[in-house]
Amino acid sequence: MKASERTKPISYLKSRTAEAISCVEETRTPLVITQNGYAKAVVQDVRSFEETQESLALLKIIALSKKSTERSKPKTIGQAFRSVRKRTEDFR
């Protein structure tokens, strides 16, 4: 789908809401809504939204891990495994 076909004025969304949602859901392509000629909102299907949120969460975890390793000395693989084994033994 062309970018021009994915950008619609708010009047299109008002008059063809069901059609727009159906198209977004089927194609999994977001729809950019404009108001007074400026992009104001994006309509996205729920599955794509959830996948995006999961990806962002993973990226945040990676960024936090990177910050953590930059601030302190990271554990070796052996130390990490010993730590995990010790914690699992504590639950037994």
Image (cartoon, helix red, strand yellow):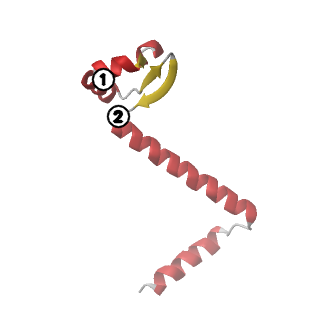
What secondary structure is marked by label 1? helix
Separation of residues labelled 1 and 2 (CA atoms): 9 Å
Is residue 26 placed above or below 54 in the rendered structure? above
Position of 55 with respect to 12 (left or right) is right
- Residue plotted at (48% across, 86% down): 90
Say which mark, if any, is on residue 68: none
Say which mark, if any, is on residue 45: 2
Please name whichever residue, 67 or 78, is drawn nearer the observer in this view of the structure.
Answer: 67
Instruction: Name the kind of residue labelled 2 in the image.
Output: Asp
> Residue beneath label 1, please?
23
List x then y, in percent, for residue 41: 46, 29
Instruction: Name the kind of residue labelled 1 in the image.
Output: Cys
What secondary structure is marked by label 2? loop
List x then y, in percent, for residue 56: 52, 46
Position of 80 with respect to 41 (left or right) is right
- Residue plotted at (42% across, 42% down): 51
Is residue 56 placed above or below 84 in the rendered structure? above
- The quadrant in which the N terminus is found is top left
List x then y, in percent, for residue 91: 43, 84
